Amino acid sequence: MRADRLLTLLLLLQNRGRMTARQLAAELEVSVRTVHRDVEALGAAGVPVCADRGPAGGYRLLEGYRTRLTGLTGTEADSLLFAAAPGPAAELGLGADLVTARLKLEAALPAELAGRVRRMRDRFHLDAPAWFRDADPVPHLAPIARAVWEQRVVLADYRKWRGEVRRELHPLGLVLKGGIWYLVAGAEGKPDPRTYRVSRFETARVGAETFDRPPGFDLAEYWERSARRMETARLHQTARLRLSPRAVALLPMLFGSAGAAAVAGATGPDAEGRVEVDLPVEPDAVAVGDLLRLGPHAEVLAPPHLRAAVHAAATAVAALHAPD
């Protein structure tokens, strides 16, 4: 809405001082011509906007002028939870509200504290997604977030590994983990809440019907307990590995805390400088690919079935790349 844009323009000039029309257009995501029209509208409303001409020119407010329009709306206040993560805020449909809320907060602060806030923003940045992986497409995130907030039932088609299922869900909360959104929700006929990856929703229709949250449900506590349970269930077996110094360095990078713990408990080195470690791994179908990332720097000593599976996979790769 134009009124929101005019307020944002006013707060930009108050918080940052002189800005060119191009800078304002970039911040507001409009054309330079629109900025000129908006500045004229502010002037007509009695806001003392001055135009300085020349290479160092731009728009600024008359010295000493400060607006008192710094009250937060409900959605702007909600958006402050994501003040350090503008990307996720935008995915939830709160991007514009977050920008306006931040500007209002800066405008309400004394000059010295407002300057500290700007320096913090200039010097620190949070980038939630992991490296070398595109973010999941989440076209249904915004309506699901609305259902979480309003405690409304969601009728959804969800894509599982074994096919698509339809679920009537009671959405309890959203979690952003490593750049991936997850929904924690109760499901019809299921006694306990479950976790759903938001990108796997094929449809998500928010109904008019509301539901009651389970008494005492704590999202953070549920997530921590669920993550521990998932980690325990994921690592089905322990592989005994013989590693070169190169593999020792790679293990914590590729296997996280499990790799670091394995290196800490290493035995050796032997005459070739190799050490032996015990590494918790997933079932063979997944573990083989994970271990092959170590290349010739790791040898699987046990269990025998995993060693045989790695040998078969490596043999197939070697055959595929044999010289003509």
Image (tube, rainbow, N blue to C red):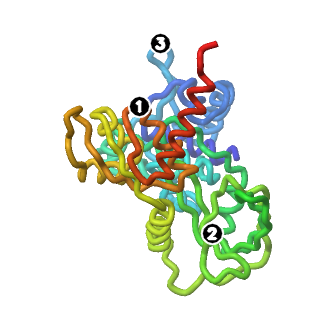
Local crowd size for mark 2, using a 10 Å CA cut-off: few (<14), some (14–19), many (≥20): few
Which numbered marker is on residue 244? none
Q: Secondary structure at mark 3?
A: loop
For the residues labelled 2 and 1, the Cα–Cα distance comes to: 51 Å
Q: Residue at x 44, y 49 (%)?
A: 84
Specify which label sits upstream in the sequence, 3 or 1: 3
Which numbered marker is on residue 149? 2
Q: Amino acid at mark 2?
A: Trp
* Whole-percent x, y for residue 145 in the image: 64, 62
Q: Amino acid at mark 1?
A: Pro
* Whole-percent x, y for residue 91 in the image: 62, 49
Q: Is residue 30 above or below residue 302?
A: above
Point out the frontmost of discs 2 and 1: 1
Horizontal arrangement in the rendering, residue 98 relative to residue 274 (left or right): right
Camera-side residue: 255 or 80? 255
Q: Quadrant of the image for the C terminus?
A: top right
Q: Residue at x 68, y 25 (%)?
A: 33
